[in-house]
Image (cartoon, grey):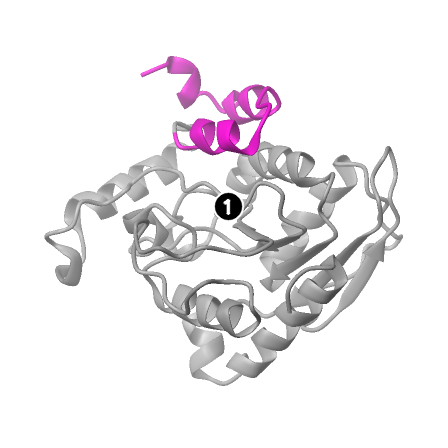
Amino acid sequence: MDEAEEDAGFPAYRAARCASVAELDGAVTGCRACPRLVAWREEVAAVRRAAFRDEEYWARPVPGFGPADASLAVVGLAPAAHGGNRTGRMFTGDDAGDFLFAALHAAGLASQSTATHRADGLELYGVRITAPVHCAPPGNRPTPAERDTCRPWLAAELALLAPGLRAVVALGAFGWQALLPVLARAGWLLPRPRPGFRHGGLVTLPGGEGRGPLHVLGCYHPSRRNTFTGRLTAPMLTEVLERGARLAGGAG
């Protein structure tokens, strides 16, 4: 193992040097910059949940998922301990992912409505799913320091998508708040004061430094709490995704 992968500065150093989305996806999976997250993701994989005791967990940072020329991005929070941390793919293998992929399929953005493992045949159309934090955090709560350490991966990913990126859907307040400073650094102009998160909210950021305008939409996160209580329903999520696709000029 390269000792640099365990250094807090590794994401900033390595992400900025990735020349393609594929290279970035490979690089992020080797990151060990956050000791608490590394310990947790590996502990979960060792102990395992009873339902998955015979499965081999991914137990590494989870890269983004979707085409490298996507015009729409969906930004979540972080992989789930027994979801993405187990399967190795964003939002795959947990309740939130079931809810999200069903809505993506209904919006014409996914080839199927279910996502169970990396070899299940699922394809995304014109949309890429990623997160501000690539490792599963204890209690689904990354610390501000972990968010900031991981930020260069998201910044590099959005910069690589930038030539064709036209819209972003931020899932939840954490995704929204983590996304805005990254977009500012990537060349889009943020209004002052910075807009707050709200479900169904839309902010269009003027382009700069060769960037075209970018539409940023807010949507409640498809967490179990939000979906079980009805705060977020399937039609609500599908509507936001369809709107994002229209603004991006793609399907839906």
Q: Main secondary structure of the magenta part?
A: helix
Give the vertical position of 19 relative to 206 (above or below). Answer: above
Task: Give the residue type at disc 1.
Answer: Thr
Image location (x, y in percent) of residue 147? 55, 42
Q: Which residues are magenta?
A: 1-29
Along the line of sight, which residue is nearer the eye, 28 or 150?
A: 28
Crowd class of label 1 (few under 14; some 14 to 19; many from 20; radius 10 Å): some
Image location (x, y in percent) of residue 223? 45, 69
Give the quarter of the image for residue 37: top left
| Residue ID for mark 1 | 143
Who's the residue at 32% across and 49% down the image?
118
Along the line of sight, which residue is nearer the eye, 59 or 207?
A: 207
Give the quarter of the image for residue 194: bottom right
Who's the residue at 40% across and 22% down the image?
6
Q: Secondary structure at mark 1?
A: loop
Left of 194 or right of it: where is 54?
Answer: left
